[in-house]
Amino acid sequence: MDMNRRQFLGATAVAGTGIPSRWSKVAPLLAAGSSPVIATAASEKPALLGGTPVHNGGWQAWPVWRQSWETEVLKVLRSGKWFRGSATQVEEFEAGYAKLLGAKRCLATASGTTALIVSLHVTGVDAGDEVIVSPYTFIATYNSILTSKALPVFADTDPATLTMDPATIESCITERTRAIMPVHIFGMPCDMDPINAIAKKHKFAVIEDACQAWLAEYKGHKCGTLADLGCFSFQESKHLPSGEGGAITSNSADLIDRCNAFHNCGRSSGDFKGQGSFTRGNNYRMQQFQAVILMQQFDKLVQETARRRESADYLTTNLKQIPGIQPVRLPENSRAVWHLYPFRYDARHFSGLSRDKFMKALSAEGVPCSSVYHEQYYDGLLDEAIASRGFKRLFSAERLKAYRDSFRELKGNRQVCEMTVAMGQNLLLAERGAIDHIIGAIRKIQTHSAELAKA
Ligand SMILES: Cc1ncc(COP(=O)(O)O)c(C=O)c1O
């Protein structure tokens, strides 16, 4: 299945069903293309071979909104004060989001990508530097580093957690290394203690890519507050969406002042004055419309996060009983928020049924799923970057060759790319009966795996 995460999330969020009853009781949720729940009994014959799908009711559409939000959006429209500097909603959002996360400060940005670019700049990542990063992520993570004219150097992925394996970081260090960028992929916290310890030892900055990890927790603290800076995305597919949008969180007022200056065309901010009234910078500001849409959703995010966790725990308990299905291991004392719910698929327990055919069979049963990320470092993007005039000026030919060759060593990541199957967050919002359909559909495919493998 060759679908990127966003196409996949878009495709799964169609017919609305399984709308959590607590929401429909509070206020109607509105969504593009909602339709009522229809559940059918499981049939013995796999849907891919002409049987009845285990689940044919569709899933929660995404994004959703409430009629009550319209008043707030209209107020901004009618005020004519849409730009960050003309009113206070963006600042109110920043204060609210910082509080929600337990961070000292927050800066809203235009997107998650721009949050990462700003963070790299203020932590001193410059042209010709190197940043150690997870390869198992959305391509924007790589691009934020390339845009800073730095090299994204990949630590390997731990196949058990899908996140950066801290044991593989030290071998990535060169005299150019400046920062580490762990990614809490699918809302699953990275093991931050060993990552922070390595960074401290070598005086590297740590920027968390928490773009999929709103309210995820590691050892009692929220992702985005575990290192120097944390970056979030509020793009439409996200748990806290505003079409586009992003934020940077930190416990350092100085770093956030610097972020503010850089994201606001270099205007001095707070205690950060730069060399004069302007420093280097760009326009990466959030609009007031985005801020009011986001503020309406704080309570909803908290409640839906609890719901997703409940469903994910239930799935994990049940799926790990199925031979060949291995749910992900989380670091000790951490809590994921499940932007996607992934598991490892081992075809040997399914009569050799390929992962692609397994996913087709599962989708046919009414359970949309995806293989998500592949080995993106072979896609041409990095070849294009390292062949560019700028990168050739900044790095020696030997370094660029060794860099390109190092992709071969990413054995953990290769395994993850070959074995992962994941379901979208919207499935986790469904009622328990629909979650049982997911488990039932996988069991049904296993029972019929030999027929499916031959078909
Ligand atoms: C892990 C990760 N990093 C960065 C980004 C970039 O965020 P945005 O799309 O808001 O620029 C995303 C968004 O999908 C993401 O999932």
Image (spheres, rainbow, N blue to C red):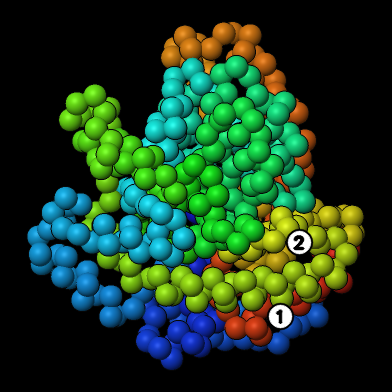
Q: Nearer the viewer, residue 394 or 45?
A: 394
Task: Kindly indicate the quadrant of the structure image that contains residue 355.
Answer: bottom right
Residue named by callout 1: 436
Q: Nearer the viewer, residue 356 or 405?
A: 405
Q: At 20% across and 29% down in the image, what residue appears?
A: 278
Name the secondary structure under disc 1. Answer: helix
Q: Nearer the viewer, residue 188 or 347?
A: 188
The amino acid type, in three-letter code, at marker 1 is: Asp
Q: On the rendered image, what quadrant is the C terminus found in?
A: bottom right
Q: At 57% across and 76% down in the image, what residue appears?
A: 307
Label 2 to label 1, Cα distance in Å? Answer: 16 Å
Q: Relative to 397, does residue 298 appear above or below in the rendering? A: below
Image coordinates of residue 264 in percent, x first then y, are 24, 40
Image coordinates of residue 124 in percent, x first then y, are 43, 27
Say the numbered circle drawn on residue 327.
2
Q: Residues within 10 Å of mark 1 (few under 14, many from 20)?
A: some
Q: Is residue 74 visible?
A: yes
Q: Relative to 193, does residue 313 appear above or below in the rendering? A: below
**Residue extending farthest front:** 271
Say the numbered circle drawn on residue 389.
none
